[in-house]
Image (cartoon, coloured by chain):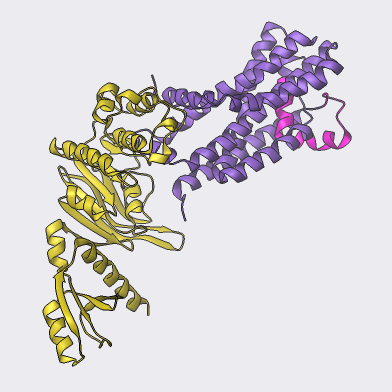
């Protein structure tokens, strides 16, 4: 069953193309990670899905309806940005306010207990620590017993312990059958939580698959060596030089080494190793940028 | 409890936690009342009643322009505002809640003027006139609520603060709120009927005295309400559609 869907969704802000014909489907029971650097379009896509904005062209659906229709958002849980909590309201009041919007909310005490905020119920949110505010913000996504929770960068700015607590809450919700879409620019986070990764860059979906498959598809290797001059080699997706070493990212390391030898350039200390998901991800993004650059040239 | 009331309740709760915000809009009219009306017209029952009604109009105007103009612009700055738009409640609920809270604060901000008038001046109204005056406040809130919303939804918060402050004094003075019904300076008498404040205060005067309101000012008040509703609606839709560039 499809809970959220974007179909050829495009969103422009004036001259800026924030999303470019994006397709995304989130099915019941999935835990999907939305991965991309800042400015890739993750937040714009999320804003479309939760009904804050409408696509310039294309379509978005939430529980089969238009996300801008309040009824379509009844089984949706969203988290506010931690800095956005009304500072003068008490923790319990904020929870009560959000609860009032749902037919069968989680009782306040139970929710606060689950997120380790029971003792802060009477504190004004402005007086909470950063970690407590973040936990309250995430707790609000679960007040209405949602079927789908959409979290935009839920652990940004959290210390390690608080991040683990939050991950546990997300995993527990998913284990009980809940569906989660979460955006992050932390690969660690997406790898730790998600089964499926959607990589977004420059407003487009670059890849949509399992964590393992993304690695497989990209298959990017890092070939590094020391050389004075670098010949022009085919199949290189990214080049960098650090501490006198040249690093080449390529999808076909064997062929690259053959070409390197064939070019007759002297080199030493050759090293070939698979990349981290982060490097793979940067390679797709950069590849996309190179492609876009040639397209506009 | 209906959702709109829930929204109104929390809106009020937020305001009340910073009481100076409430005091602010009540201060100017109450101070004007104390410094100018009480010593100069306090003993004259008719004059004091007119002046009290004018100061109530002033309080209603400043309460609404400030709380909506500045309040809405500030809320739009907070990430909490987009979050509440993801809750399963339509814009009508949030809007109604805000207006209800606004009405409560408006009545609160005019209370000092009423108390000062009753205690320290010869101003007198019959119970019926008092009731009519209370209803009149709700009616004359409309144009200033819309003006506040238009400012709040169309400007960033710093600009909104300045515009609200710049706009409210000329409206009060130009509309003749700071002078008696028939002894305003000449140029004020010329421009007053074309300002929403004049129609508003004419309505208030008609409610609490036996004065017949100036028809031109009332027609212009209607025109202002229509125009300001249009601008406020436009600003609201524009804001919901595109916030970021």
Q: Which quadrant, please, contains the C terminus of chain A?
A: bottom left
Does the magenta-highlighted stretch encompass residue B88? no
Front one among A30 and A119: A119
Pinpoint residue A164: horizontal percent, then vertical percent: 22, 41
Q: Quadrant location of residue B57?
A: top right
Pinpoint residue A45: horizontal percent, then vertical percent: 32, 52
Q: Quadrant location of residue A35?
A: bottom left
Does the magenta-highlighted stretch encompass residue B203? yes
Front one among B161 and B233: B161
Pinpoint residue B105: horizontal percent, then vertical percent: 58, 23
Image chain in yellow: A
Residue at 60%, 41% in the rendered image: B151
Residue at 21%, 36% in the rendered image: A169
Residue at 74%, 8% in the rendered image: B119
Q: Is residue B244 above or below residue B20?
A: below
Q: Kindly give the residue lying farthest to the top in the view shown.
A: B127
* Relative to A230, B22 lies left or right: right
* Relative to B153, A157 lies left or right: left
Q: Is residue A277 above or below residue A144?
A: below
Q: What secondary structure predominates along the stretch shown in magenta?
A: helix
Q: Which quadrant, please, contains the N terminus of chain A?
A: top left
Q: Quadrant location of residue A264?
A: bottom left
Pinpoint residue A184: horizontal percent, then vertical percent: 28, 51
Q: Is residue B64 above or below residue A18?
A: above
Query: From where the camera sits, is residue B169 visible?
Result: yes
Image chain in purple: B
Front one among B193 and B58: B58
Magenta span of residues: B179-205
Residue at 19%, 91% in the rendered image: A263
């Amino acid at each position: 069953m499809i809970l959220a869907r974007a179909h050829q969704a495009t969103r422009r802000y004036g001259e800026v193309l924030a999303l470019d014909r994006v397709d995304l489907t989130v099915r019941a029971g999935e835990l999907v990670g939305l991965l991309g650097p800042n400015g890739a379009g993750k937040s714009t896509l999320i804003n479309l899905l939760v009904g804050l904005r409408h696509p310039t062209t294309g379509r978005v659906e939430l529980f089969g309806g238009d996300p801008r229709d309040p009824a379509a958002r009844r089984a949706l849980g969203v988290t506010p940005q931690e800095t956005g909590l009304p500072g003068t309201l008490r923790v319990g009041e904020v929870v009560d306010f959000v609860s009032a919007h749902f037919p069968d909310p989680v009782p306040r005490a139970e929710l606060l207990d689950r997120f380790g905020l029971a003792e802060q119920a009477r504190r004004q949110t402005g007086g909470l620590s950063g970690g407590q505010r973040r936990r309250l913000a995430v707790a609000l996504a679960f007040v209405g017993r949602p079927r789908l929770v959409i979290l935009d960068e839920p652990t940004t700015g959290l210390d390690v312990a608080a991040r683990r607590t939050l991950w546990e809450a997300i995993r527990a919700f998913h284990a009980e059958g809940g569906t989660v879409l979460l955006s992050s620019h932390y690969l660690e986070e997406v790898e730790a939580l998600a089964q499926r990764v959607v990589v977004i860059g420059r407003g487009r979906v670059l890849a949509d698959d399992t964590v393992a498959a993304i690695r497989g598809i990209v298959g990017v290797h890092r070939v590094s060596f020391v050389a004075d001059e670098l010949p022009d080699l085919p199949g290189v997706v990214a080049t960098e030089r650090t501490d006198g070493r040249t690093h080449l990212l390529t999808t076909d390391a064997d062929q690259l080494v053959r070409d390197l030898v064939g070019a007759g350039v002297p080199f030493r200390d050759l090293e070939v190793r698979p990349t981290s998901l982060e490097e793979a991800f940067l390679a797709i993004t950069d590849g996309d940028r190179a492609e876009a650059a040639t397209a506009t040239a | 409890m209906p959702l709109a009331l829930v929204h109104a309740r929390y809106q009020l709760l937020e305001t009340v936690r910073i009481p100076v915000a409430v005091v602010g809009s009540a201060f100017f009219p109450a101070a004007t009342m104390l410094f100018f009306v009480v010593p100069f017209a306090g003993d004259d029952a008719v004059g004091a009643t007119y002046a009290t009604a004018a100061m109530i109009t002033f309080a209603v105007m400043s309460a609404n322009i400030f709380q909506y103009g500045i309040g809405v612009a500030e809320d739009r700055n907070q990430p909490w505002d987009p979050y509440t738009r993801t809750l399963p409640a339509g814009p009508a609920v949030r809007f109604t809640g805000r207006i209800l809270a606004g009405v409560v604060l408006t009545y609160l901000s005019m209370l000092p003027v009423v108390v000062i008038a009753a205690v320290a001046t010869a101003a007198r109204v019959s119970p019926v006139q008092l009731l009519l005056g209370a209803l009149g406040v709700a009616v004359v809130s409309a144009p200033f609520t819309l003006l506040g919303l238009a400012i709040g939804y169309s400007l960033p918060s710093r600009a909104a603060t300045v515009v609200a402050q710049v706009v409210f004094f000329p409206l009060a003075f130009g509309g003749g709120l700071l002078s008696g019904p028939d002894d305003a300076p000449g140029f004020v008498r010329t421009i007053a009927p074309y300002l929403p404040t004049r129609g508003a205060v004419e309505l208030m005067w008609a409610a609490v005295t036996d004065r017949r309101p100036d028809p031109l000012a009332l027609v212009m008040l209607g025109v202002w309400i229509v125009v300001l509703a249009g601008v406020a609606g436009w600003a609201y839709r524009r804001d919901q559609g595109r916030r970021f560039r």
